[in-house]
Amino acid sequence: MGRLRVATSSHDPEPQPTFMPVRAERIIMSLFNDIGRKVEALKQEVEKASDDEATHQCSECETRLYTDHDECPDCGSTAVLPLSD
Ligand SMILES: [Zn+2]
């Protein structure tokens, strides 16, 4: 009887504290939220940079440049023109 009881109780899942996995899940969730926010901010920054901040453009290969260049860093052309709206 004693032996059976030991076998049963070692097989039964004891009421373990469940806050560990829940906490891990929350940490992962908040990490994903954090990463999502950063990716979103980065995306907006890239979009902004590619649209708004290009000040010059190579008229040979149409590479957009964000600073004034004497030569296009892409094709070496000197036909870098300032962008105007
Ligand atoms: Zn070029």
Image (spheres, rainbow, N blue to C red):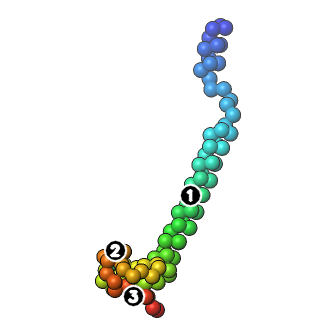
Tell me if the residue at label 3 has its CB under 8 Å from ligand 1: no
State the image coordinates of residue 48 (x, y, percent, origin top left): 51, 76
Answer above or below: position of 35 versus 18. Answer: below
Name the residue beneath numbered marker 3. Answer: 81
Mark 1 is surrounded, within 10 Å at the Cα level, by few (under 14), some (14 to 19) or many (20 or more) other residues, namely few
Residue mark closest to the camera, 1 vs 3: 3
Quadrant in the picture for the N terminus: top right
User: What SS does tag 1 mark?
Assistant: helix
What residue does disc 2 label?
A: 74
Residue type at mark 2: give it. Asp
| Residue picked out by circle 1 | 35
Residue at the spot 31% in from the left edge and 81% down from the top edge: 77
Q: Amino acid at mark 3?
A: Leu
- Disc 2, ligand 1: is the CB inside 8 Å? yes
Nearest the viewer among 77 and 34 is 77
On the image, the x and y values in percent for residue 28 come to 59, 49
